[in-house]
Amino acid sequence: MPSSLLARIESQNKYKIMVATKSNMLPIGTTAPNFQLKDVTTGEVIEFAKQKNAKGYIIAFICNHCPFVIHLLDHLSLKFNQMPSNEIEVYAISSNDIQNYPQDSPEKMAQLATQHKFTFPYLFDGNQEVAISYLSLIHI
């Protein structure tokens, strides 16, 4: 949506904006910051720098309570589960504050991943360092 149109909609107060931070995709080829995070379903610590087998990577910052994620969850898990056949590795990361959003706790993340049959790691970024390192790459 063009920013001028978004500004007009906001000024007319016809629609509420659902998120405080808009989604941004880094350009393909951007060097991804390394991370070491625990996969909530396996307990394994995943170190991104050691993952060298893929032709590409998708790193998605999601969380259990996000209405957009909930809406797309079945489609998202189906598509993400298929990516390794294209030599694309997928990592889903939740960086939410579990004090304010207890539904995003590692235990609840594991339940969601099992329920939706995630075959990709669902990683918990409890101190939000990984999210901050990726956010620093975005030129807003």
Image: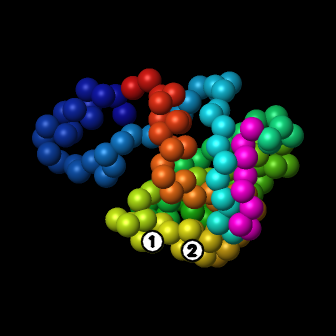
Residue at horizontal 61 percent and vertical 65 percent from the top: 74
Q: Spatial distance from mark 1 to mark 2, Cα to Cα? A: 9 Å
Q: Magenta includes 61?
A: no
Q: Alpha-carbon neighbours of circle 2 within 10 Å: few (<14), some, or many (≥20)?
A: few
| Residue 52 place in picture, x, y as percent | 83, 37
| Residue 89 place in picture, x, y as percent | 76, 46
- In the image, 107: left or right of 81? left
Q: Secondary structure at mark 1?
A: helix
Residue at horizontal 48 percent and vertical 49 percent from the top: 128
For residue 109, what is the image quadrant?
Answer: bottom right
Residue at horizontal 68 percent and vertical 61 percent from the top: 39
Residue in the foreground of this view, choosing between 56 and 93 = 93
Q: Secondary structure at mark 2?
A: helix
Would you say residue 33 is visible in this rendering? yes
Amino acid carrying label 1: it is Gln
Residue at horizontal 41 percent and vertical 59 percent from the top: 97
Residue under label 1, please give it. 103
Residue under label 2, please give it. 107
